[in-house]
Image: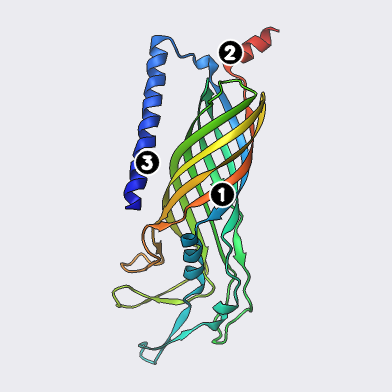
């Protein structure tokens, strides 16, 4: 159901983007659109992000609820499974983190479109010891995510208002990366064997839908704004083996976050403005 709603939202934003783009090209053909008035911009932003309870529980259960290694006999047959009590000594992750953004885009009159490259500092739970009671090496448990959204916005109070309100929406993708506590063994879903984790990050892909509103103070060419919004994220299971069954986690996991932050924007001169400046 949620995936269907997300697909509908994606389709709506895609349609809006195509309509606006087609309208812009049509306007250009009719002489109403002046390329010389396009202004590029770049923004730097930082925000507080709060995960929903489902995603917080998913991260902590994925990384701390299961940790086991198999015991084999001389013939290589699995005879026992030993669970790692060291997982209980790791600190679990909180439900908030800092989001960082680099944005670049273009503005034409009141319409804006931009790409939002978003990332975050790596969240780390330090290992309680170098080895567990069974002699297996322990690692710091960590996770981080990064992604990109294509955003569309509109200045409600005009192009050059000192105070402006800018609602925006867009779609994109996110990549979640996790590092487990040790080289644990996981059974295949069909029971045909076991796969062992390695000392590396494992990743899963997600589709996203982002909606936000910014209250901006314009001091052209610079501006500063406060913004808030909600980002819908749906993760797929983590692949730990290319073979069938080597998956961790459930499909369609909600990684939704709400956020509030601050944004600093530098808007460049348009070609028309640059020519006028050069004449002075």
Query: Sequence-wise, which precedes: disc 1 or disc 3?
Result: 3
Q: Secondary structure at mark 2?
A: helix
Name the spot of residue 47 as percent of width and height, x first. Answer: 61, 46
Measured along the vertical axis of the image, is residue 62 above or below residue 26?
Answer: below
Where on the picture, by quarter, is residue 93?
bottom right
Q: Is residue 137 visible?
A: no
Identified at 56% across, 78% down, the residue is 88
Q: Are marks 1 and 2 in contact (CB under 8 Å)?
A: no
Name the spot of residue 52 as percent of width and height, x first. Answer: 50, 57
* Residue to which mark 2 is pinned: 272
* Residue to which mark 1 is pinned: 119
Between the C-alphas of marks 1 and 2, the distance is 35 Å
Identified at 49% across, 75% down, the residue is 183
Query: Sequence-wise, which precedes: disc 1 or disc 2?
Result: 1
Query: Sequence-wise, which precedes: disc 3 or disc 2?
Result: 3
Q: Residues within 10 Å of mark 3 (few under 14, many from 20)?
A: many
* Residue to which mark 3 is pinned: 10
**Residue closest to the eye, 105 or 218:** 218
Q: Secondary structure at mark 3?
A: helix
Residue 119 shown left or right of residue 25 in the figure: right
Residue 47 shown left or right of residue 246 in the figure: right
Q: Are marks 3 and 2 in contact (CB under 8 Å)?
A: no
């Amino acid at each position: 159901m949620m995936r269907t709603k997300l697909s509908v939202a994606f389709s709506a934003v895609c349609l809006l983007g195509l309509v606006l783009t087609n309208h812009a090209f049509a306007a250009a053909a009719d002489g109403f659109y002046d390329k010389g008035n396009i202004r590029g911009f770049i923004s730097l932003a930082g925000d507080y992000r709060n995960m929903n309870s489902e995603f917080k529980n998913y991260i902590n259960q994925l990384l701390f609820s299961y940790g086991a290694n198999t015991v084999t006999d001389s013939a290589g047959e699995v005879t026992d499974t030993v669970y790692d009590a060291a997982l209980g000594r790791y600190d679990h992750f909180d439900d908030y983190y800092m989001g960082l953004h680099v944005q670049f885009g273009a503005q034409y009159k009141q319409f804006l479109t931009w790409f939002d490259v978003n990332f975050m500092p790596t969240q780390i739970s330090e290992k309680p010891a170098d080895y567990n009671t069974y002699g297996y090496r322990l690692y710091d448990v960590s996770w981080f995510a990064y992604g990109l959204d294509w955003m569309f916005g509109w200045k409600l109070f005009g192009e050059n208002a000192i105070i402006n309100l800018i609602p925006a929406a867009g779609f994109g993708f996110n990549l979640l990366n996790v590092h487990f506590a040790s080289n644990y063994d996981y059974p295949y879903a069909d029971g045909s064997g076991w796969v062992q984790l390695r000392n590396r990050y494992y990743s899963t892909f997600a589709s996203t839908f982002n909606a936000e509103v910014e209250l901006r103070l314009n001091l052209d060419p610079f501006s500063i704004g406060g913004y808030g919004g909600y980002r819908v994220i749906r993760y797929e299971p983590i692949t730990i083996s290319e073979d069938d069954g080597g998956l961790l986690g459930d499909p369609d996991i909600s990684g939704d976050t709400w956020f509030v932050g601050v944004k600093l924007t530098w808007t460049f001169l348009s070609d028309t403005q640059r020519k006028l400046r050069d004449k002075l």
